[in-house]
């Protein structure tokens, strides 16, 4: 039986990770827009990978369950790369919470029921989750452990509590890292691991939307004032994912890896600190 890596979100980061961790495995590329998945599949196929494509709406339980069925029909699901999401400049607070927070909870729950022993997963979160002030212990637990279908009913996620799209995004990304920590316990009972990567500004089409959007000046300032002095690349995210999903990361599960060129450090303790 073939080993299958499921890549949800066929953008630059998902593709970069797939290239690093999918040698000798079947790749199932899934995206909301099947034409995006098909284009990415052609690129990976030209590089020697065996690729199938599927459409998925991560905010739909039926759609995510259908993707799980497609994956297990191809072989043993040994890897899950969840890189789908929307940014603050692309969507309303309601859509961000539904896709980035609820959608991630659905993916972790559904694939946590079929992940193979020795398998691993990564969820792409964001540095934004690290710029949200500390939540209460009760709020952390609620984001981590509330059943997926009850998640959006939490009082802290109601419209009167969410100030804008950026706030919704930060809460979603904080929730992603907390959710992965809790799910790592359940995945561990199957002999599998799962972790979060929280990238900073990585040059992708999504980042270009932000750089040219209403928060563009802030994004450019983050690039200029961080220790690295530049944006990151999808391949650099792929490097971290390869560690986390491979044998060298065998002792790592339930962790969140912040890779932002030093932006968060500068935000809390340096030149980017709010004044």
Image (cartoon, grey):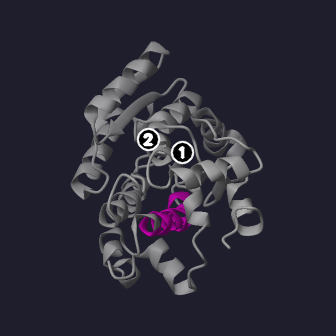
x 27%, y 33%: residue: 34
Q: In front here: 194 or 265?
A: 265
Q: Quadrant of residue 178?
A: bottom right
Q: Is residue 238 left or right of residue 97?
A: right
**Alpha-carbon distance for marks 2 and 1?**
7 Å
Image quarter in which the N terminus is found: top left
Q: Quadrant of residue 27?
A: top left
Prevailing secondary structure of the magenta residues:
helix
Query: Could you tell me if residue 273 is visible in this image?
Result: yes
Element under disc 1: loop
In the rendered image, which residue does mark 2 sit on?
77
Question: In the image, residue 186 lies at what x, y percent?
Answer: 50, 64
Question: In the image, residue 118 lies at what x, y percent?
Answer: 57, 45
Magenta-drawn stretch contains 183 = yes
x 52%, y 55%: residue: 125
x 39%, y 60%: residue: 109
Q: Examine the rendered structure and indicate whether residue 247 appears above or below residue 20.
A: below
In the rendered image, which residue does mark 1 sit on?
119
Callouts 2 and 1 close, C-beta under 8 Å? yes
Q: Is residue 203 left or right of residue 158?
A: right
Question: In the image, residue 90 lies at what x, y percent?
Answer: 36, 52
Which segment did they paint magenta?
167-188
């Amino acid at each position: 039986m073939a080993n299958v890596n499921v890549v949800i979100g066929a953008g630059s980061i998902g593709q970069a990770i797939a290239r690093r961790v999918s040698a000798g495995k079947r790749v199932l590329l899934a995206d909301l827009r099947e034409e995006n998945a098909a284009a990415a599949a052609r690129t990976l196929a030209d590089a020697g990978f065996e690729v199938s494509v599927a459409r998925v709406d991560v905010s739909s339980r039926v759609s995510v369950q259908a993707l799980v069925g497609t994956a297990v029909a191809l072989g043993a699901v040994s890897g899950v790369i969840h890189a789908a999401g929307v940014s603050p400049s692309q969507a309303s607070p309601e859509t961000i919470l539904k896709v980035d927070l609820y959608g991630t909870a659905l993916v972790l729950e559904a694939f946590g029921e079929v992940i193979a022993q020795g398998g691993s997963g990564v969820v792409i979160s964001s540095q934004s989750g690290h710029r949200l002030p500390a939540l209460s212990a009760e709020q952390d637990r609620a984001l981590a452990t509330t059943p997926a279908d009850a998640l959006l009913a939490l009082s802290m996620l109601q419209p009167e509590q969410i100030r804008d799209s950026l706030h919704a995004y930060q809460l979603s990304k904080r929730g992603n890292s907390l959710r992965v920590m809790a799910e790592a316990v359940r995945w561990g009972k199957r002999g599998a691991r799962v972790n979060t990567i929280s990238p900073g500004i990585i040059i992708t089409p999504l980042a270009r939307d932000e750089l040219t959007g209403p928060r563009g000046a802030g994004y450019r300032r983050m690039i200029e004032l961080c220790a690295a002095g530049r944006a990151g690349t999808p391949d650099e995210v792929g490097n971290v994912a390869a560690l986390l999903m491979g044998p060298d990361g065998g002792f790592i599960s339930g962790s969140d890896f912040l890779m932002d060129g030093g932006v968060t450090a500068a935000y809390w303790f340096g030149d980017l600190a709010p004044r």
